[in-house]
Image: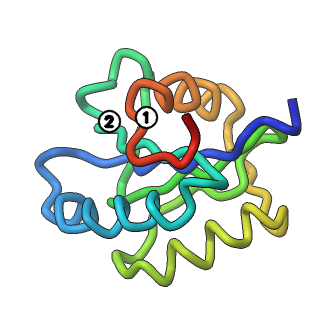
Amino acid sequence: MASERPWVACLCAAWCVACREYGATFAALAAQFGADADFAWIDIEDDADALGDLDIEDFPTLLIADGAGARFFGPVMPQAQTAERLIRGALAGDLAADTDPALVERVRALVPVRRIGSGAA
């Protein structure tokens, strides 16, 4: 399972102004890294049943993971450079986050349904 294609999920909320503003940046990151990872925009309220009791305090929050588990889980500054550095580090295997494996699996299950701009067919 460690060879699973990496994925990046932006956990957001429709009411969050910062998330709405970050949407274009996240779409640009998906276009930039789409050949190497899958990207999904997940509204934590729309997908509350699938996500379970998830307490996100700061938006936008990214979860970057692969078959080995979470590489990053936490809020990011809305500048593209911040997420770009995190994504590059995660793809290189330089990052590993201590995150609830059940949360990783719940979000991973939503990635195919919420995927945006991907280089993979």
Q: Report the residue at 32% width, 36% height from top.
A: 44
Q: Position of residue 109 (x, y in %)?
A: 54, 22
Q: Which residue is mark 1?
A: 54
Of the image marks 2 and 1, the number of the one nearer the N terminus? 2
Q: CA distance from mark 2 to mark 1?
A: 8 Å
Closest to the camera, between mark 2 and mark 1, is: 2
Q: Report the residue at 31% width, 48% height from top.
A: 12
Amino acid type of the residue that numbered disc 1 sits on in the rendered structure: Leu
* Mark 2 Cα-neighbour bin, 10 Å: few <14, some 14–19, many ≥20: many
Depth check: 111 or 103 in front? 111
Q: Report the residue at 51% width, 72% height from top.
A: 83
Which label was assigned to residue 11? none
Q: Position of residue 16 (x, y in %)?
A: 17, 55
> Outermost residue, top direction?
49
Q: How is the image coloured?
A: rainbow
Does residue 99 lie above or below 83 as drawn? above
Q: Determine whether the residue tagged by mark 1 lies in a helix, strand or loop.
A: loop
